[in-house]
Image: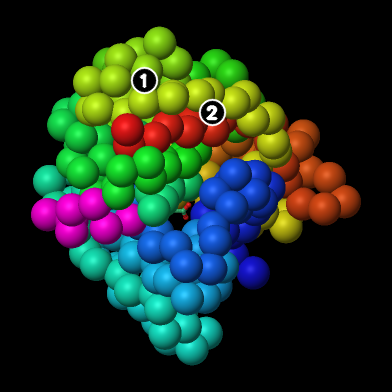
Amino acid sequence: MTTNYDAELRRYNEVLRRACGVQPQEHVLDIGCGSGQTTRQAARAASAGSALGVDISPPAIERARELARAEGLRNVSFEHADAQVHRFPQQRFDLVTSRFGTMFFDDPAAAFANIRRALRPAGRLVILVWQSGEHNEWNVAVRQSLPEPQEPAAGPDPFSLADPPAVKRILDAAGFADITFTDVHEPVYYGRDVAAALDWVHGFTCTREALNRLPPAAADHALGRLRETLSAHLTDDGVWFNSRAWLITAHHP
Ligand SMILES: C[S@@+](CC[C@H](N)C(=O)[O-])C[C@H]1O[C@@H](n2cnc3c(N)ncnc32)[C@H](O)[C@@H]1O
C-alpha cells in the first residue's frame, strides 16, 4: 500500500472524529477535504443530515467523489472551491471541520469570516492544524537530512496557524467566539518500510525543491541521509514520527 494522508494521519483522524461528535441530523462542511475521508466519516455519522467537502484541488475532489460513490453514500457531496472566497450557503452548517486543510489561506481572517458565515448561529468549528515546525519531529528530521535552503520557502506554510495568540486574533477578527486550543501529541505514519516512507517524503514540496537545487551527486547524498533518517524511525509497524498539532474549537456566536 502506498502512503497517503489517510494512512499518515490515522491517529489524528480518531482525535478529530471524537472532537467533532457529529450527530445524525447535522449538516457538516469539511474544508480542504482532500480525498474526503473525513467528509465520508461525517456523512456516515450524519445519517439524517449531510456532509459537503470542498477542496481547491480538482484531482482531490475527483478522487473524493469516486471513493464516496464506491461506498454508496447518498448524503455526501464534494465541490471544487477555494474556501477563502467560495459563496457557501449562509448559516447552513452545524459544524465546520478540517483535518489540516486551513493553513494555506492568503488572508486567514477574511477566509475564516467567509467560513463562519456558512455556520448557523451557535454552530461549531473543529479543526486540526500543525504546531510549529520545531515541535514536529517529522519536519525537523526531514529538514536536517536536506541542505539548508538559501531563502525561506515561498510556498504554502503548513505551520501558519501554529501560534495560538495569533490564531485567536484571526478567529476573533473573523467573528468566532469561545476559541479553545488543545495540545494533541500523536505520531504520524510514513509508510510500511523505508522505501515507502522515502516515496512519501519525496512528494513533499520542501523535499522536491531541496533536491532539485542540488547537483546529481549531492542530491544522491542527501537522499542517502534521508533514507538513514527514515530507517532510524522504522518500527515493527512501519515508519513513524512524533508530531504535535492544535485541535482548535470555536463557535459562531
Ligand atoms: C494537508 S492536505 C489535507 C487534506 C485532507 N483534509 C486530509 O486530511 O486528507 C490540505 C488540503 O487543503 C487543500 N486546500 C488548500 N488551500 C485551500 C483552499 N483555499 N480552499 C480549499 N482547499 C484548500 C489542499 O488542496 C489539500 O487537499
Q: Label 2: state its secondary structure.
A: strand
Which corner quadrant holds the N terminus? bottom right
- Name the kind of residue labelled 1 in the image: Val
Which corner quadrant holds the C terminus? top left
C-beta proximity under 8 Å, tags 2 and 1: yes
Above-or-below relation of 210 to 200: above
- Mark 1 is surrounded, within 10 Å at the Cα level, by few (under 14), some (14 to 19) or many (20 or more) other residues, namely some
Above-or-below relation of 234 to 50: above
Towards the viewer: 253 or 116: 253
- Name the kind of residue labelled 2 in the image: Trp
Q: Is residue 188 left or right of residue 82?
A: right
Q: Label 1: state its secondary structure.
A: helix
Above-or-below relation of 229 to 117: above
Could you tell me residue 184's position as x and y percent? Answer: 64, 30
> Who's the residue at 75% across and 37% down the image?
233
Could you tell me residue 22's position as x and y percent? Answer: 54, 58
Q: Which residue is mark 2?
A: 246
> Who's the residue at 12% across and 46% down the image?
85
Is the shortest distance between ligand 1 and the CB of mark 2 under 8 Å?
no
Residue interval drawn in magenta: 87-93
Q: Which residue is mark 1?
A: 167
Regarding residue 99, the answer to whether it shows in the image is yes
Could you tell me residue 229's position as x and y percent? Answer: 68, 33
Q: Is residue 14 left or right of residue 109?
A: right
Q: Quadrant of residue 107?
A: top left
**Reading the chain from its start, which is encountered first: label 2 or label 1?**
1
